[in-house]
Image (cartoon, rainbow, N blue to C red):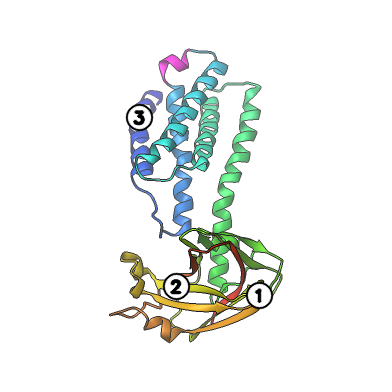
Amino acid sequence: MAIVNKRILPVLLVVLIFFLYVGGPGHYSSRIYGSVWDLGHIVLFIVFSIFLFRLPFVEQKRIFIQIVVVFFIVIFFAVSTELLQFAASRTPELKDVRRDIVGAFIGTLIVFRQKKLSSTVFPVLAFIAFFLTVLEFSTLVKILVDEYNIFKTGPVLSNLEGVFEEGRWKGSSQFELSSDVAIEGEKSLKVIFNTDEYSGVTLKYMHRDWSAKKSLHFSIFYPEDDDFLLNVRINDFMHVENNRYNDRFNKKIILTKGWNHFIILIQDIKNAPEGRKINLENMQSLGMFVMNLSEPKTIYIDNVYIN
């Protein structure tokens, strides 16, 4: 059995490396898919660490030396592969290095069990592996909980009260859940627009089917005395293919001091693209952005819903 495993391990390793570093989710992939894909780092380095432990020059050493050698190689390759992401025009992430190390811990435990090794190191490794694995899977659990909440409260796109709702929003601006002000409940989304050419925030994960609704509602609190121009963009998934300005709904709104309440007719959103209709059954995002600010500006978004 050990011989068969030794023959299978290199093949399995090559297959996992191919799929993990060649494929993967894109910018518009679902966050569940992205989170599950990220956990693939753990699987890859479980196999990689087991493979390393079975190399003759490692296997012949004392167990403590084996662990040191294996983790040195694992960390070297984990960091190196992330740095290589620059060459592939991809973004390296320290989180991936952490997942790789989690996989190495689990692989080490598997080797310990297979070899029936008794060591004082084993309980320590087991605790670390369990703690780190729970930490990694917690992200997926949070996403699944929030996706269920999206399904359950479909017309409410984001009321910012859910503990995981901040994860529905993405953007180049700094943003966070805040209890400073709220139109309903206790929280809103505090957004600080920066002075980049484009600075914005997007509700990316939400209820997708707007076809049975008549209007989109949202409220924005602006704390300053001057009027503030804000761009709103709304699009379906078909828009992702070209990302043209006139292939989506665009609207400029003016914010004055205090709460500002907006209603946009779904029919206007549907008819906005040039030469086609928006697919209201498969909406992709609701974005708000500014351009070339002379100084940072702060707003609070709350109670985004369709009815």
Q: Residues within 10 Å of mark 2 (few under 14, many from 20)?
A: some
> Residue type at mark 3?
Pro
Mark 3 or mark 1, whichever is nearer to me: 1
Picture coordinates of residue 160, whole percent (x, y):
62, 68
Viewer-nearest residue: 53 or 91? 91
Query: CA gap, disc 3 to disc 1?
Result: 65 Å
Query: CA gap, disc 2 to disc 1?
Result: 25 Å
Q: Is residue 252 magenta?
A: no
Looking at the image, is 109 positioned above or below residue 60?
Answer: below
Viewer-nearest residue: 211 or 298? 298
The span picked out in magenta is: 55-60
Residue at (65%, 77%) from the top-left corner?
257
Mark 2 or mark 3, whichever is nearer to me: 2
Please name the residue that numbered disc 2 is placed on: 233
> Residue type at mark 1?
Asp
Viewer-nearest residue: 199 or 99? 199
Please name the residue that numbered disc 3 is placed on: 10
Can you name the residue that lies furthest to the front here? 294
Residue at (39%, 28%) from the top-left corner?
5
Q: Which mark is residue 225?
A: 1
